[in-house]
Structure formats: structure tokens, C-alpha cells
Image (spheres, helix red, strand yellow):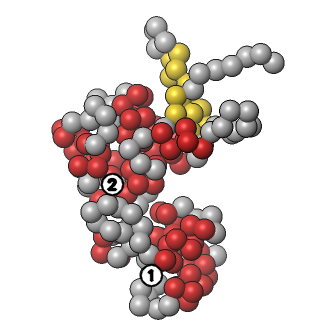
Amino acid sequence: SGVGYGILTTAEDYTKLNVGDITKLYIYDHIRENAHDLFGFTMLDTKSLFEQLLNVSGVGPKMALNMLSIGSGESVRLAIANGDVKFIQSANGVGRKLAERVIVELKDKVGLSGIDLDKSGLLQSDSLLLKDEAVQALMGLGYSAQDAALALADVDKKAPTTERVKLALKERK
């Protein structure tokens, strides 16, 4: 009806948006004395991580958006859980001290507690990319990387991929 809004979004979400397409965004409304900013996210868990980042001292909405723009919300979540200071520090305007503060304050709050992803063999420690075919298969079925890793945590890593996927699906029901 002729009304439009400017929405700030992560680099990942921006690539998913096309002019003219109908898109659902989860909005975070940030009101200040001199500004009214809207931050939009295609996934609710990314918005939730954004809000968690805002609770860290020294992190404002634009800084949190910068952190979420260095990779997918899932990769940022994994970097925080694994204490990857360099990955968080690669965000525009984020120094070492702030990256360390984010990790210290959010490490146990990002939803990955109870599983050591490095020891589970589900991640490449240097690049944080999922390499496990079973994880990729579960993600193809709609699981997030986090849920796929959790579903496979108790499944024998030496079993064939198809068997691991079946066992993970059984465990999650």
C-alpha cells in the first residue's frame, strides 16, 4: 500500500532476498532518541542469537549484525561455543577483547552445551565447516547444523552414513 521500511540484515540473509519476492522476516525493533532501526532475520534462531549478542557489554545492534555477517548464524554460534576468538574477531570493528568477552559471556548460552563438537569429529577445527556426510544429510532433511550434530552425538561414527542417519532420526523421535 505504498509503505516501505528500510531493514538492516546480515550478509547471509541479504543474499537470500530478491526484489519483488514476498519474504518473512523476524524483526528486531531498536528505538533510540534519534533513530528507529529495524533489523530483519530470515531465521528465528539467528534473531535469538542477535538478541543474545546485544546482552554482552559493549555490543550494540550494528556490532551484533557485523558479527552475524561473518558467516551463517550457525557458524557464529559454533565459533562462540568452541571459543574461536579469531573467527569472531574477523567481524568489522570487533577487537580481541570484545571477541573474548562475547565468548566468555555466551559460550554456555548459545545452545551447544552437552556436546564437544571438536571431539565428536563433526567439525574441522580450523574452518568450522561441517565435514560429516551424516550431518549434511540431516541438514538436507531440514535439521539445523546444531540439531544434526546433537542427533549424531551418541551414534557410532564408524557406522556407514545411511545407518548413522537412520539411528539419528530414531533417537530424535
User: Which mark lies nearer to you, 1 or 2?
Assistant: 2
Residue receiving disc 1 = 154
Q: CA distance from mark 1 to mark 2?
A: 22 Å
The answer to whether residue 169 is left or right of residue 114 is: right
Asked whether the viewer can see residue 48, the reply is no
Q: Residue furthest right?
A: 1
Residue type (three-letter) at the residue carrying disc 2: Ala
Residue receiving disc 2 = 79
Q: Residues within 10 Å of mark 1 (few under 14, many from 20)?
A: some
**Residue 166 higher or lower than 80, as above or below:** below
- Would you identify the image quadrant in which residue 129 lies? bottom left
Residue 169, given in percent of the width and then of the height, sits at 60, 78
Picture residue at 81% right of the left edge, 18% below the top: 1
Q: Tell me the SS state at disc 1.
A: loop
User: Looking at the image, which is closer to me, 156 or 95?
Assistant: 95
Residue type (three-letter) at the residue carrying disc 1: Asp
Picture residue at 31% right of the left edge, 34% below the top: 92
Quadrant, the C terminus: bottom right
Asked whether the viewer can see residue 51, the reply is yes
**Residue 7 higher or lower than 11, as above or below:** above
Q: How many marks?
A: 2
- Res 87 label: none
Residue 98, given in percent of the width and then of the height, sits at 23, 37
- N-term-proximal mark, 1 vs 2: 2
